[in-house]
Image (tube, rainbow, N blue to C red):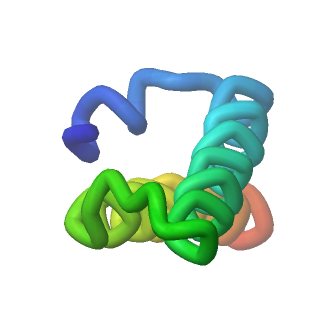
């Protein structure tokens, strides 16, 4: 997911998205452990999406705390 699209989301939507992405990663890891892998590239992409979302949330929090 692009950072532009993530920046358009509200904080509540970002929190929900992060939770959904984390549950998807958990499911993929479980599938990997049972030998039903979809591919490790998908896990990498999900981890990056989570990182982008968390970064944008932190940027917003720091702007609010610094009076922005």
Q: Residue at x 21, y 66 (%)?
A: 41
Q: Is residue 32 left or right of residue 48?
A: right
Q: Quadrant of residue 39?
A: bottom left
Which quarter shows the C terminus?
A: bottom right
Q: Is residue 1 above or below residue 60?
A: above
Residue 35 image point, x, y percent: 48, 68
Q: Is residue 64 above or below residue 29?
A: above
Camera-side residue of 32 and 64: 32
Residue 40 image point, x, y percent: 29, 71
Q: Residue at x 76, y 45 (%)?
A: 19
Q: Quadrant of residue 65?
A: bottom right
Q: Is residue 66 left or right of residue 1?
A: right
Residue 52 image point, x, y percent: 40, 61
Which quarter shows the N terminus?
A: top left
Q: Is residue 57 visible?
A: yes
Q: Is residue 60 visible?
A: no
Q: Is residue 9 above or below residue 18?
A: above
Q: Residue at x 60, y 46 (%)?
A: 24
Q: Residue at x 51, y 60 (%)?
A: 50
């Amino acid at each position: 997911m692009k950072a532009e699209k993530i920046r358009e989301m509200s904080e509540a939507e970002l929190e929900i998205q992060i939770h959904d992405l984390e549950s998807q990663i958990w499911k993929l890891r479980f599938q990997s452990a049972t030998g039903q892998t979809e591919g490790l590239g998908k896990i990498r992409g999900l981890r990056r999406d989570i990182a982008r979302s968390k970064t944008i949330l932190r940027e917003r929090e720091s702007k609010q705390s610094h009076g922005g």
